[in-house]
Image (cartoon, coloured by chain):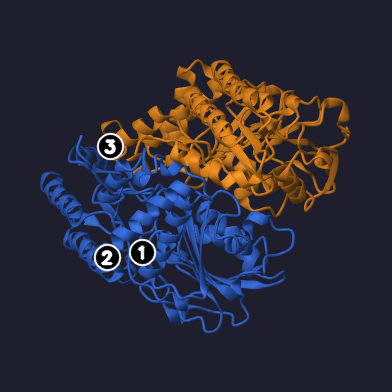
Chain colours: A orange, B blue
């Protein structure tokens, strides 16, 4: 079968040239006679791969020199604990903005370690929007402010960087990292599971300002201390080497495309194409407020929920897969990560127009 | 370049037929038009891959029905914390047998959570042996007894299963899992980083008896609770999907070879070949006691340490790589994991005989 158009929310589509390179190098990386999977993480070949991946990520995101890049494991869910264990002093407090399921999970985990202030929430409208700056009830004494930069399930995204004064801003950027330029210096810490825009599942990126490292609380597991990983260049123990390698190829691919400004232009074009149809249509409906819409995850419903099953079946026949919406929202969800080509979104839109014509 | 003979201690050589299959399926798994890396962990394709991997592992190891298999992240190093957080009650105590660097790290981490009794240690002889049963000073009130089944750095391995009475036996089996049959019912919990005999780095296997799940201490990070992962079939959050897939292919490969009894026979033959040379030679020396020798990791030294560099350089020329010993032991180390063919060990032995002839 030919490659399909894969709208999975994650793990998600990867750039085909990257996959082809991984395939070609799979049994013998650069003539060394080994797969990257078979290399010691302390050998010169893999250390060069990791160093290059970090350098390319730094170039791509413009990461300042006073930020460390950590290649970790455990996903954003482990960061929900690692963050307060490292940044929230005993007896301290932190601000959380609730914009969906993942934000709630992050806040719930932080509550185990200190006081959590809900600075704002869009729960009342089923998380269909991102609170604006003036809504944020920030505590100047908070240890940090936590936002979920993009909400994979509810399809919303911050299109502004919250001003948190001197309080470090922390973002769970799992589902929109590398999709647009970001001023890293506005953040204290950015974390992201790799399995959307970065690479294979099992790798977690943490970008953290130097001064926020080294304050892990006593008794926390050693592996949850940012300092341990920073001091050991992410090789305190064996890192997820193959995932780092694939992610490094993705970074190089994005640089070759013109970096994040070019990536953003492509993502805007793709999102506009699909949202345009949703807004013109009386058959499809998008639950999110226009100003808060995610470019990465587009939830939508059909006029009649009984058409969901035929829609999914016919879409699959047309090579458009993994469109089923998250169980907590229902309907459909099209994820348009970096590696989804414009042609894939066009194919989806064409299919949707045709489906409406036949069933509307 | 042709594939080399890779003696890395981990990440380590993988079976070439498995790598070839991974390569062939890389852009399109079984005609679904996606790479395994691109599949939702909740989609039917990946869920089938994971279920099959678990079923094959259960068949391979004969895992009883009252044990859960968990596919986790973080390596053995995270298990050093997760284990006491789940099995050691507040105020409780645990027995640890010290047989090397990893055992010491495991014990040090457990000390953060309770009382650690050193049941035995071979530190006095630089960890060149495994304590025998009669040396173990076991506490009947211990929550568990922890052993390091194979010691990657010092090259020793348990060739008996310690009798711990009714106290659960826990083994860090990272560097010898799947290398020999094991009676899982003798253990309360077995854990292993994947990157030696299982698959790519970034996956950690935990095999745990049902009754030991559900006792995680209050305030521990949610992600460190075995119960959360058991209840969610290792998909509480996104698991390391690609590593699970590759490991599943390795399980199938080992089953096709005749299962662990056949794997063990091959490993004994390989180890005998190399140890035989070491014991006959006056030029090479093996620091480990014969009864404790690991079949997986064989450390050895040359008569003259000044020959180390030429040995490594000439070995590399002969396609024999990653032979440098761990910095805490020095000399050489040849890791003979399952995927190292007998021909690879024969090539090493032939090279060593020739090297001795020329330099001895």
**Horizontal and vertical percent for residue B273?**
18, 61
Q: Does the rendering let one see residue B249? A: yes
Image position of B290 (left or right of A124): left
Q: Which residue is mark 2?
A: B263
Q: Which residue is mark 1?
A: B178
Q: Are marks 2 and 1 on the same chain?
A: yes
**Horizontal and vertical percent for residue A343?**
47, 24
Residue B288 found in image quarter: bottom left
Q: Specify the label residue A28 is tagged with.
A: 3
Q: Is label 3 in a helix, a strand or a loop? A: loop
Whether residues under marks 3 and 2 lie with C-beta atoms below 8 angstroms apart, the answer is no
- Which residue is depicted at the point 54% across and 76% down? B168
In the image, is residue B74 above or below residue B177?
A: above
Residue A192 found in image quarter: top right
Whether residues under marks 2 and 1 lie with C-beta atoms below 8 angstroms apart, the answer is yes
Residue A142 found in image quarter: top right
- Which residue is depicted at the point 52% across and 42% down? A322
């Amino acid at each position: 079968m030919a490659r399909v158009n894969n709208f999975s929310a994650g793990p998600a589509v990867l750039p085909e040239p990257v996959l082809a390179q991984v395939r070609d190098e799979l049994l013998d990386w650069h003539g060394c006679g080994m797969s990257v999977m078979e290399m010691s993480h302390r050998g010169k070949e893999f250390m060069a791969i990791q160093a290059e991946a970090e350098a390319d990520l730094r170039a791509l995101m413009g990461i300042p020199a006073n930020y460390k890049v950590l290649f970790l494991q455990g996903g954003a869910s482990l960061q929900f604990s690692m963050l307060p264990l490292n940044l929230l002093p005993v007896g301290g407090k932190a601000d959380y903005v609730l914009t969906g399921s993942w934000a709630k999970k992050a806040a719930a985990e932080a509550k185990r370690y200190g006081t959590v202030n809900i600075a704002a929430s869009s729960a009342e409208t089923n998380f269909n929007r991102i609170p604006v700056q003036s809504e944020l009830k920030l505590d100047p004494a908070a240890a940090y402010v936590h936002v979920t930069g993009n909400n994979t399930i509810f399809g919303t995204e911050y299109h502004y960087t919250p001003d948190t004064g001197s309080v470090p801003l922390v973002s769970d950027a799992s589902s929109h990292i590398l999709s647009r330029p970001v001023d890293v210096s506005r953040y204290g810490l950015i974390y992201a599971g790799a399995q959307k825009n970065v690479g294979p599942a099992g790798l977690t990126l943490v970008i953290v300002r130097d001064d926020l490292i080294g304050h892990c609380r006593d008794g926390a597991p050693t592996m949850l201390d940012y300092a341990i990983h920073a001091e050991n260049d992410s090789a305190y123990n064996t890192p997820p080497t193959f995932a780092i390698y694939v992610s490094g190829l993705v970074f190089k691919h994005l640089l070759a495309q013109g970096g994040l400004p070019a990536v953003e232009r492509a993502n805007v074009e793709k999102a506009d194409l699909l949202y345009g149809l949703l807004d013109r249509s009386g058959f499809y409906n998008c639950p999110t407020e226009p100003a808060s819409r995610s470019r990465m995850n587009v939830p939508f419903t059909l006029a009649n929920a009984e058409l969901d099953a035929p829609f999914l079946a016919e879409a699959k026949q047309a090579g458009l897969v993994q469109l089923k919406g998250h169980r907590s929202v229902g309907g459909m969800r099209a994820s348009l990560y970096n590696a989804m080509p414009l042609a894939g979104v066009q194919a989806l839109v064409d299919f949707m127009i045709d489906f409406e014509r036949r069933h509307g």
